[in-house]
Image: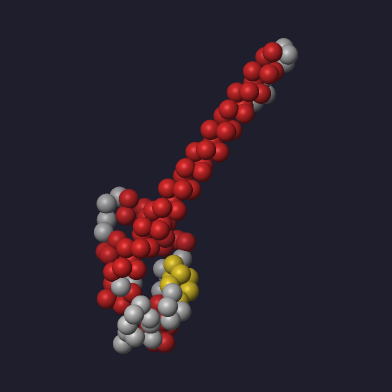
Amino acid sequence: MSLGGGRFSDEEVRLLRGLSAVANATRVRITYSDSFRKLCMRRYLAGESPVKIFREAGLDPELIGYKRIERSVARWKKMDTITRAAEERRQAIKRRHERAIGAALRIVGQPEIG
């Protein structure tokens, strides 16, 4: 059924598009739904096997390929790490800003805001 080389037949594309875990599929690419990506990462970080998670979502590793699963999880893990780091930087900047405003208000004798 599979065309090999990471390509999907028309029938496989239709099957993939019918899964709730898939936002879109073409002959060469699968775009996963945000809800599946989040669920997958939550379960993966809790110690579950990516292959098991994908299989339970109807994404048979024999169809989509073990390497595609491995790369997807690695990419999502990296994205989540970058997102968390950016949020932590934003929060640190916000705290520094709030402390600076508080210090400036104390210097001029104004009550602090917030």
Looking at the picture, does residue 14 appear above or below residue 31? below
Q: Which residue is rendered at x = 29% and y = 61% of the image?
A: 50
Residue 42 location, x and y as percent? 36, 53
Instruction: Name the image quarter holding the N terminus.
Output: bottom left
- Image coloring type: secondary structure
Looking at the picture, does residue 40 appear above or below residue 64? above
Q: Quadrant of residue 103?
A: top right
Q: Nearer the viewer, residue 78 or 51?
A: 78
Total numbered labels: 0
Residue 77 location, x and y as percent? 39, 53
Q: Which residue is rendered at x = 31% and y = 68% of the image?
A: 67
Q: Which residue is rendered at x = 32% and y = 63% of the image?
A: 70
Q: Nearer the viewer, residue 35 or 95?
A: 95
Horizontal side, residue 13 vs residue 54: left or right = right
Residue 3 location, x and y as percent? 34, 86
Looking at the picture, does residue 110 appear above or below residue 72? above
Q: Quadrant of residue 62?
A: bottom left
Instruction: Name the image quarter holding the C terminus.
Output: top right
Residue 30 location, x and y as percent? 43, 72
Tell me if I can see residue 97 in this picture.
yes
Q: Quadrant of residue 49?
A: bottom left
Q: Residue pushed farthest front?
A: 5
Tell me if I can see residue 39 in this picture.
no
Horizontal side, residue 95 vs residue 26: left or right = right
Q: Which residue is rendered at x = 47% and y = 42% of the image?
A: 85
